[in-house]
Amino acid sequence: MSWDIESFREKVESEHTFPGVYIFKFIVPSEKKDEILELLPKGKTSMRSSSNNHYVSITCRAELSSSQDVIEVYFEANKVEGTIAL
C-alpha cells in the first residue's frame, strides 16, 4: 500500500472526534458498487449514478467508535479496482 497509515490516522483524529459520525465518499464503477456497499458500516447510505451509468457515487454517514474503523474501510476499499475515495 502506497499511503502512510499513521499520517492518515493523525489527520482523521485531528479532524474528527470519536465516537462520532464519519462520512465516507466513493466513486466506483457501477459493476463494483456492491463490493463497496458490503464494506461500509451500517449508517445512512445514498447513491447517485453518473449520466452514462458507468459510475456510482456512494456516500455513507455512519457512527464509528475510532479512527481505526475509518482506516479499515479505506484499506479494504482500496482493494476494489477502479474505486476513488474522496
Image: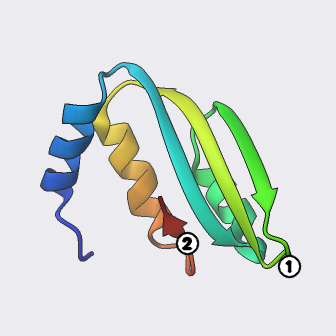
66 lies left or right of 33: left
Nearer to us: label 2 or label 1: 1
Label 1: state its secondary structure: loop
User: Residue 40 at x, y = what percent?
Assistant: 58, 46
User: Residue 58 at x, y = what percent?
Assistant: 67, 53
Q: Quadrant of residue 13?
A: top left
- Residue at 14% over, 54% down: 7
Q: Using the numbered discs, state the Cα–Cα distance from disc 2 to disc 1 in whole angstroms.
A: 17 Å
User: Residue 84 at x, y = what percent?
Assistant: 51, 69
Q: In this figure, which residue is indicated by the disc labeled 2? A: 83
Q: Residues within 10 Å of mark 2 (few under 14, many from 20)?
A: some
Foreground pick, 62 / 39: 62
- Residue at 36% over, 19% down: 19
3 lies left or right of 82: left
- Count the labels in the image: 2
Q: In this figure, which residue is indicated by the disc labeled 1? A: 52
- Residue at 79% over, 79% down: 54
Locate the N terminus by quadrant: bottom left
- Mark 2 vs 1, N-terminal side: 1
- Residue at 55% over, 80% down: 81
- What amino acid is found at the position of numbered circle 2 in the picture? Thr
Label 2: state its secondary structure: loop
- Placement of 52 over or under 7, stated as above or below: below
Q: Residues within 10 Å of mark 1 (few under 14, many from 20)?
A: few
User: Residue 36 at x, y = what percent?
Assistant: 63, 59
